[in-house]
Image (cartoon, rainbow, N blue to C red):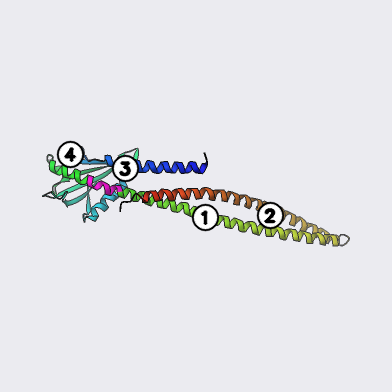
Amino acid sequence: MNRHLYQRLLLTLSIISCCAGGAGLYAQSKAYESQVSYQKGTQTATMIDLPYPPDVVESSIKDYMARRGWKNSSNRGYKVYRNLRLDDTASSLNDLHIRVDRKSSRDKNSSVITVLSTQPGEDPGTRMGRDAAAMSRTSGFLEKMVPAIESGDLEARIKTREESAKKAQNKLGNLHDDQADLEKKIRNTQEDLGKNKTTQTQEAQTMQASVNGDADAMKKSHKRMDKLLDEQTSLQKKLTKYQASLEQNKKDQESQRVTTGQEQQALDSLRTQRKH
């Protein structure tokens, strides 16, 4: 299979896998109840598993809350949002204590959100029993937040891909600059070779003219000719090296153009997933 065709095929499969995989996991994300340790005790928490990195999830939650005018404070490893109305039908307010962790030590791209819902100002550690209505509203609140987290993950991936695409474009630009530099070195070296050969011709004429003349002058002329021949050899080696580097540069540019195009294609694909 053609190498470039193979690279494009891999990119296409990667994009399809990324998009389909993320959408499938998101569709399955539902809140559930579980027991968690808190202040040497056990509390019932609302939890949800998401296929996104913890830092992205935390940032997305913070942005989601901030857009609604809710700021957080920190308490015992949780971000605390106070006096929230969890849905339009709620007659009372709640505090949410939110923590985001990696789902497992082996998977840095999956998270679990743990939420302890309390009455305003209540310490989760002293919470007694289970408030079924509050737990239900908390589950609904979490699930409504998921699209915003999904969007945050998409924006994070777009940013990463933008940086990657920019690096690829810069590398291509550097290779193009290197080509111009090598072409200039080749021209200069060819000019130097031409001058060297002209000087050799002149020196040969000088040696011919003084063949029956001063021995010292002849000796000096031979030394100049030897130096010119050494310089010619050195220049030819440089020219060969520059020409080989130029050929490799052109091959590298061809490969980098493919990579740059793939990066841009992947970036464009991610951007089309934005929901306006």
The residue pinned by badge 4 equals 44
> How far across and how far down the image is residue 181, in percent?
58, 57
The earlier-in-sequence mark between 1 and 2 is 1
Q: Which residue is mark 2?
A: 235
Q: Which residue is label 3 attached to?
A: 23
Q: Amino acid at mark 2?
A: Leu
**Which tag, 1 or 4, sits closer to the chain's start?**
4
Distance of label 3 from label 4 (alpha carbons):
29 Å
From the viewer's perspective, is 132 left or right of 32? Answer: left
Give coordinates of residue 271: x percent, y percent.
Answer: 36, 51
User: Residue 51's spot in the image, x, y percent?
Assistant: 31, 42
Mark 2 or mark 3, which has the lower sequence index? 3
Q: CA distance from mark 3 to mark 1?
A: 38 Å
Q: Nearer the viewer, mark 2 or mark 3?
A: 3
Q: Is tag 2's residue or tag 4's residue first in the polypeptide sequence?
A: 4
Q: Residues within 10 Å of mark 4 (few under 14, many from 20)?
A: many
